[in-house]
Amino acid sequence: MKQNKTRAPWAPGDVLSLLFPQRCPFCDGALPFRARLNAPLSQAGTDDPWIHPRCFPADILLREPLCMKCGRSLGETGGAFCRDCRERSFHFKQNRAVWQYAEPARGAVTRFKYRGRQQYAVYFARAWLAANREYLEQIRPDVLIPVPIHRPRLRKRGYNQASLLAYELEKLTGIPCREDLVIRTKHTGAQKDLGPAERLRNMENAFRLKKPPEGIARVLIIDDIFTTGSTLETLSRLLLDAGVPEIYSATLCVAGGDL
């Protein structure tokens, strides 16, 4: 007797989604289990299935005009650079981000970085690319390099949030993520209470090349927050000294400055 085969109204992945739901980065609430990685990449706005529409932080989006160096919103201050970038010299060419470092993005990045919400990387990569696709097309990086963290910290945390973000961007863009080029050799500790000059001194000799970046002309460094730029500056100097001509960076948020 021929069996009547009917397709189940659910897929195995749906069961996993119910047991371990994807969560909205901004409220940490569970998302509908039909959200899928292959959902169209729009503007990573209210229609993105990887956040709750009501949670989209439109008020802290970085809006043009942007600082030509760090990517902060300039508002009505005028000029090409923010106050911080007018007063300092950086060796990387440009940083671009998505949000000001304020709530709810601040809380989302904190959970992503310290509280095991690795799954946020999916939406964060989508949001960054939606906001900065033109920038990426202009700079055409050869590789993505996530800012490495010190080995003891990696063991304690279990993951590097910059690496998670870089690998999600690799999936979306096809640009290879290279974690094999640079390692962190120094535990720098918390830098939130340090000024720009102190941060830069604290970062001295924090990175070392594992292998020469042969054949690489343009690097996009990946990190979570741009605060004073000390981490990016230190890593940029190392790569420039190793022969990489152009260094750019991508972060989720930009803190401080003229905001």
Image (spheres, grey):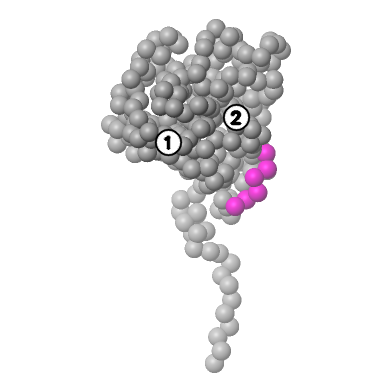
- Select label 2 or label 1 by which is in front: 1
**Would you call the spot at circle 2 few (<14 residues within 10 Å), some (14-19), or many (20 or more)?**
many
Mark 1, other Cα within 10 Å: few <14 / some 14–19 / many ≥20: few
Kindly identify which residue carries mark 2: 98
SS state under label 2: loop
Question: In the orientation shown, which residue stands out farthest toward the top?
Answer: 87
> Where residue 200 appears, x then y in whole percent?
41, 14
Q: Which residue is mark 1?
A: 214
Q: Check disc 1 and give the amino acid type.
A: Glu
Kindly identify the residue that appears in the image at 58 percent across and 72 percent down: 7
SS for dot 1: loop
Q: Is residue 141 left or right of residue 45?
A: left
Which label belongs to residue 102?
none
User: Could you tell me which quadrant the N terminus lies in?
Assistant: bottom right
Instruction: Tell me which corner region of the image, top left, top right, bottom left or bottom right, holds residue 147.
Output: top left
Where does the image place residue 170, in percent across and percent down from the top left? Answer: 51, 43
Q: How many numbered marks appear?
A: 2
Q: What residue is drawn where x is 56% and y is 50%?
A: 37
Q: Is residue 187 left or right of residue 81?
A: left
Main structural element of the magenta stretch: helix, strand or loop?
loop
Q: Is residue 47 magenta?
A: no
Q: Which residues are magenta?
A: 38-43
Residue type at the position of mark 2: Val
Taking depth in this image into account, of 74 and 7 the one nearest to the observer is: 74
